[in-house]
Amino acid sequence: MTSSNPATVYRLDYTASSFLADRIDLVFDLAPSVTQVRATTELHRNPDSENRDIVLYGEELELVRIAMNGKVLAKPDYATDNGELRIPDAPDKVTLVIDTLLHPDQNTSLMGLYLSNGNFFTQCEAEGFRKITYFPDRPDVMATYTVTLRADREKYPVLLSNGNLVEEGDLPNGRHYAKWEDPFKKPSYLFALVAGNLVCREETFRLADGRDVLLQVWVEKNNLDKTAHAMESLKHSIRWDERRFGLELDLDRFMIVAVSDFNMGAMENKGLNIFNTRYVLANPRIATDLDYANIESVVGHEYFHNWTGNRVTCRDWFQLSLKEGLTVFRDQEFSADRTGSESGRAVKRIEDVRTLRQLQFPEDAGPMAHPVRPDSYQEINNFYTVTVYEKGAEVVRMYQTLLGRDGFRKGMDLYFKRHDGQAVTCTDFLAAMADANGRDLSQFERWYSQAGTPRVKLQSHYDEKNRTLTLILSQSCPQTPGQTEKQPFLIPVAIGLLDSHGKDMPLRMEGDKAAPNSRTLELSEESQTFTFIDVAEKPVVSALRNFSAPVILEYEQSDDELLHLLSHDSDHFNRWEAGQRLALRRLLSLTKAVQADRTLTLDSAFIDAFRAVLTDTALDPALRELALTLPGEMMIAEKTDEIDPAATHRARQFMRRTLAENLEKEWLNAWQENRTEGAYRPTPQDAGKRALKNLALSYLLLLDKPAYGRMAIDQYHTADNMSDRLAALTSLVHSGWTDKLPEAKALPDHFYREYENEALVIDKWFSLQATSPNADTATVRKLMKHPAFTLKNPNRARSLIFGFCHNNMAQFHAADGSGYTFWSENLIELDRINPQVAARLARCMDQWKRYIPSLRKPAEQALRNVSEQSLSRDTREIIGKTLS
Ligand code: PHE
Ligand code: ZN
């Protein structure tokens, strides 16, 4: 806990480690209150370093004994200070034997060695290994590991670590042991152990090269019937990486373990991936379509890390996006390919862009804005951000857009050829892409170094006489903390032209032989002009197709043009985009109207356009659902000068209600016609139908007709899957029917009792109540008193506290500041339990300086109240930057 500002680490201060580790042998004597760790580490001097001292990192460790080359050390043979253990002027080759004691049962941070439901787990990324033993815990120090686990046989029958099991057996006093060996060198952040009472689903699987490997999914006993989907997802991931990138599994055994207490989504430890239960467990009774899709993508993500992250890792944590941006891109492509259709790919693309805009664009415009490759940090845990992950993935996607799929693959092949077994930088990745394709990509590096979302301005002029179309593209990028001047980016801008019938027109420039229907312009200067010839009529321009770059496009288009794109664009993404722009335009003026107390109206042209989409049965239901979902409140608020959450909320509610009233018949049809046939399947087709059906239901429930309330109650009771059941309950609660209809009143309790033993479903129960427009702080405080609530479990804390603070805009920003008081109280309490999770809650206030004046004051007060406390380094950094 610190009260002053913690030290800042700078990217440019990187120096190589003074000593490198070749091997480490770890022996754990596991017990909840005291675990003994013996680490035997072989180190040798790094010729690339000037420093003569051995520097090891250790945090919250009880050091029992340290010996070097057989001799026990006593101070001043070594010194400990501020998380470092230093052995001055050490010999060139040393073997260190270090004994430490840990207290897993006291560990609520869920970093290092901790307990969850009585079982042992570790989490080491980014700097958790130093909570296990003293070691050069930095990703550029790669060693081979042998690990021996000893524990009570009855309580902890299963003992797992990375790599292959080489030995196991009994020990005196009812204990037993297992010894694991990982043949691959790895950085310490990829170390893991698991010990406990677990069971597994297992399968042998044949790789493309004919080798058989053992695949296992480990869970607590009562969850074994929820592991089939994770196993399927793992097999699909292995196949996909073989086919798309020629990358094979390099181990004989690959394990996934589910844990209920976990700070993040999942972790790619070598051969022993550890997952938050929410990204493993599924069956139709407890999991929604979204859960199924998320599981497939996270299983893929962690599996793909085996090459992008583990075989080739990061030199230092500033390079985090080297593995995360790339691996997110890979999991996005995996999920897109898995849909098996063009419209499925578009659905996935739209969802990913929606996330980027809702979460990353605000980050890039706020106090925590940082480049994809940050220049400094106080706490690295705070940089597992949507910028590093999602914008990082967009940056990787742009290589593919610029170089083509084949060119991208060539770059990947060269990257692995050059760097397998190494710890490298984002620049090394760029160089592999450039060299493999014989291209100079030096300007592209700015995507890594400059923060902020670039603006691309487009102007178009059609010359009827000469039949030419001129496009003027220009770019700029707003200031971000520490970066006032920006250089132009290399931006791929994909363009298409639609004729008056909505057909694609050929795009031909002077001297071209071929004239494709879509082409990618490369904008590299501040302003550039592109001229197309033989343009038969004045086209409607479809710009930034498939969202070819993570930018904000500024292009004036009339309602008519947008309506044309909405009904005809061959680029599904831009069809959706046109609808969103039409809606956003109106939502912004409605917000103004609310603020000025004017009457709210919605034009019939817009309603007709929505009707057309809703009734266009030729269009994939999943795409229709996306098109008919209005931009989120945060998205709308972002576009206003001063954020007025209450006004935005009322504007959006008005639009939803008006669409409900005017399209009642059509919504009802959509609800009836999109029922799925047969047993539940989480396929993109069926999931799309359910999504549209349940969106229709949510609109119908906005009408004052108890018949629709009863329809939803009926859906709740008859549903054979969690998607339909949860959607019915959520809409009933959010539209207030649970207060108005006696038959609906009992449903939340019914739901609770039905799923009392399913933690992941109880999370959903908390979260659906926390996000209701009818839930104020009093509602949430009452839910916090529920026996099932605890701040200690991250999923539970997120479901209720984050649900309210992050996803209930109107209520969180209540005019009396009660939401902010609630936030500060919980933040302070959570910070004492789990700094990493607390620091994420701290991010709720990122935008406070842009709030309307009446909210700014209480927001600042809440921030100052937090700031006066003794805080973790994690939360201190966020609060400091938010206030500055
Ligand atoms: N490396 C993990 C992933 O993205 C995320 C993670 C980071 C998990 C830190 C735990 C701790 O796959
Ligand atoms: Zn990752």
Image: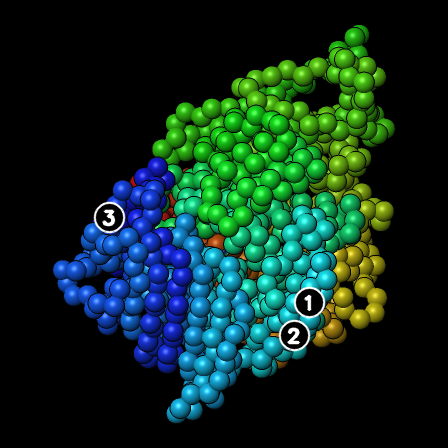
Q: Which residue is mark 2?
A: 202
Q: Quadrant of residue 40?
A: bottom left
| Residue 598 in the figure: left or right of residue 576 | left
Neighbours of disc 1 within 10 Å: few (<14), some (14-19), many (20+): some
Disc 3 + disc 2, Cβ < 8 Å: no
Q: Which residue is mark 1?
A: 212
Is label 1 in a helix, a strand or a loop?
strand
Is label 3 in a helix, a strand or a loop?
loop
Look at the image and tell me whether residue 814 can be seen: no
Give the residue at x 77% y 34%: 569
Amino acid type shown at disc 3 = Arg
Find residue 465 and report its horizontal and vertical position in percent: 80, 7
Is label 2 in a helix, a strand or a loop?
strand
Is 12 above or below relative to 760? above
| Residue 43 in the figure: left or right of residue 180 | left
Q: Colour scheme of this structure image?
A: rainbow
> CA gap, disc 3 to disc 2?
49 Å
Amino acid type shown at disc 2 = Glu
Q: Which residue is mark 3?
A: 52
Disc 1 + disc 3, Cβ < 8 Å: no
Is 262 above or below relative to 544? below
Give the residue at x 69% y 64%: 211
Find residue 484 and report its horizontal and vertical position in percent: 39, 27
Is 323 above or below relative to 730? above
Q: Residue furthest bottom?
A: 173
Look at the image and tell me whether residue 169 can be seen: yes
Q: Quadrant of residue 785?
A: bottom left
Earlier in the chain: of badge 2 and badge 1, it is 2
